[in-house]
Amino acid sequence: MSNVSPCMNFRSFVDELRQRHDLVDIRQTVDANLEIGAITRKVYEDRAPAPLFASIRDAQPGFRVLGAPAGLNRQPGEEFGRLALHFGLPKSATPRDIVERIIAASHASPVTPRIVDTGPCKENIWRGSQVDLTRFPVPLLHAADGGKYFGTYGFHIVQSPDRTWDSWSVARSMLHDRNTLVGPAMPQQHLGMIREMWKQRGEPTPWAMALGAPPAALAVAGMPLPEHVSESGYVGAMVGDPVEVVKAETNDLLVPANAEIILEGTISLSEKAMEGPMGEYHGYSFPVGREQPLFHVEAVTFRNEPILPICAAGLPPEENHTIWGTMISAQALDLLRRANMPVDMAWCSYEAATCWIVLSIDTARLQTMQTDASHFVHLIADILFSSHAGWLVPKVILVSNDIDITDIDQVVWALATRHHPARDHFAFPEATGIPLVPYLSPEEKAAGSGGKAIINCLFPEQFRGDMRATVASFDTSFPEELKRSVLAHWTAYGFPA
Ligand SMILES: Cc1cc2nc3c(=O)[nH]c(=O)nc-3n(C[C@H](O)[C@H](O)[C@H](O)COP(=O)(O)O)c2cc1C
Ligand SMILES: [Mn+2]
């Protein structure tokens, strides 16, 4: 066993959070019916430590749940600690450190998984009629949800029929009955694409789902890498250690050997059922569910005292923002840099619920392009809106790099003071995008387009390397010597340290 570090082993991840006091062991018996969801929601909103529920009413004794696995931390300087641990980074890591760490793997060779004979995920095996998902503490996460969600922080594992493409991807799945799940497999997402390949052959899709898998693997499974790129090799490149995988019991798929829980089976060719509604990443719960494909579970393998990780989606910050948003940011930045665009950072502000991405524009490089807002915006649109990553986020905000785009206060100030409402708003009604965006009309959702925009917050002079005004602030409005003196006298003036 070499996958022992917190980013490669979910149990080590939990232990490390506990050591850092970023986890609360909840021994009091709680109810999977809403109570776990309510506590987890409040944890995100208060930026409290992750809750580990050890005693859950009516569940098999010993079966546990971890909430808010990538929630933020209230401690100044450690806000991103739980997220950073997914990548093996220190708790003081900044958004920039995290994004650069993710991107570095795209310039390294993939490190394919190492196949091992067995692993902790095989400590318990249920087959066929033994399969009973209701013995797990499957939570009803919000009162308006259409069902209990088993998969909110796990990833699907599928393979193209020609075996050249292994795909790991995060998508939600709801409990349908004791051995069936139901959930989306959108045709634009790789799960849906590979399912379509199997459908063309008239066969159900061999499938597995990993829960409590290596945190780095979960994060990359939430990353919009291009088609035909296997997430498993990307994880290995990112952490410099191959993911250890083991053959599933009932099909040929390879699954993370140390995962807490593995579900195995098939995605049905044609059977569907109602799924949802669910409180979702954009912060809303729509009133009705939708028909989605069934996932038949033929075997379940799990560690002793398994831990089911969950995301109680909704208002930021939860994992659809901290994981998905961060992975989109990294992929978008990599794409734009490879296209030689003067972009030095990309950030899906968590506060914007993965509905916008902000790009930091290097004005020194921008000026050498001899371009203007309209031309530049169209260059960015051509690259982003044709990409898998760009399909996911409807709004793109361009800001010069005097602004720290990971600081929402600075982004709001730039948006309010630099963006001209008539000249700087560029709508792209033809561009395709994710149909889940709340402000889309039913017609736009059906068409799969509309609602995309690029919002320019660069003054016209900034395209020529000039600036219309200087900034008035403590940092920029005073001589260095005076600032040093003010700071040195701060407590003497009577302010707290
Ligand atoms: C916590 C979490 C929940 C997610 N839920 C879904 C979902 O239900 N449906 C979906 O299509 N994508 C969902 N995503 C986003 C996908 O994982 C992401 O777009 C990824 O790129 C999909 O994999 P693919 O690029 O291989 O298709 C979720 C991501 C995270 C981190
Ligand atoms: Mn993929």
Image (cartoon, helix red, strand yellow):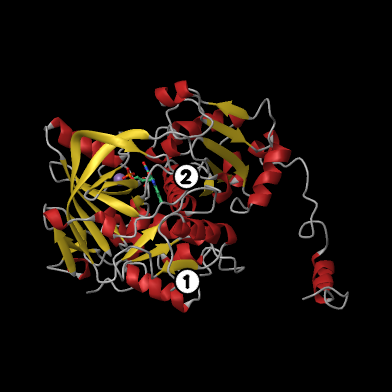
Residue type, label 1: Leu
Instruction: Judge from the rendering whether residue 162 lies leftward or rightward of residue 93; answer left or right.
Output: left
For ligand 2, give the image quadrant: top left
Mark number, residue 23: 1
Labels 1 and 2: the sequence-earlier one: 1
Residue displayed at 52% across by 63% down: 80
Residue displayed at 49% across by 50% down = 321
Marks 1/2: CA distance? Answer: 24 Å
Say whether residue 58 is left or right of residue 384: left
- The image shows residue 409 at horizontal and vertical percentages of 68, 51
Q: 2 or 23, which is in the foreground?
A: 23
Q: Which residue is mark 2?
A: 279
Element class at badge 2:
loop
Q: Is residue 287 above or below residue 117?
A: above
Q: Position of residue 309 (x, y in %)?
A: 37, 60
Quarter assignment of residue 496: bottom right
* Residue at 45%, 31% in the rendered image: 382
Label 2 neighbour load within 10 Å: few <14, some 14-19, many 20+:
many
